[in-house]
Amino acid sequence: MVSQNDIIIIDESAVLPGRGAWVHPTRECMDAALRRRAFGRALRVPTILDTQTIEDYSPRNKG
């Protein structure tokens, strides 16, 4: 995950510029990070981030 224009972008390939944050690709981990507001701290962003991208995201099953 990276922040661009105060929006969280899911960067599965880890190629986007900027500071990134890693979270397990499971709904439980993403929900916990959202509840704790961990993305702003991890990405060191002083503003409130738009998390709609993550809320709508359906993680792939990693076999």
Image (tube, helix red, strand yellow):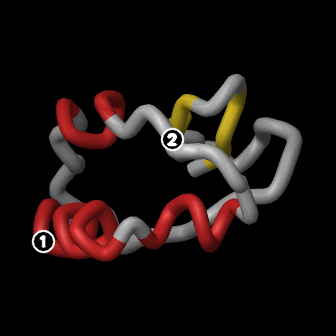
Q: Position of residue 25 (x, y in %)?
A: 31, 63
Q: Position of residue 30 (x, y in %)?
A: 26, 63
Element under disc 1:
helix
Residues under labels 1 and 2: Cα distance?
Answer: 20 Å
| Kind of residue indicated by mark 1 | Glu
Residue at image position (71%, 54%) is: 45
Front residue (pair 16, 8): 8
Identity of the residue furthest to the front in this view? 47
Q: Is 26 left or right of 20, judged from the image as shown?
A: left
Q: Is 52 left or right of 31, judged from the image as shown?
A: right
Q: Which residue is mark 2?
A: 49
Find residue 28 and name its label.
Answer: 1
- Indicate the quadrant containing the C terminus: top left, top right, bottom left or bottom right: bottom left
| Kind of residue indicated by mark 2 | Leu
Q: Is 38 left or right of 59, judged from the image as shown?
A: right
Indicate whether 7 appears above or below 31: above
Q: Answer yes or no: do the residues labelled 1 and 2 have beta carbons within 8 Å?
A: no
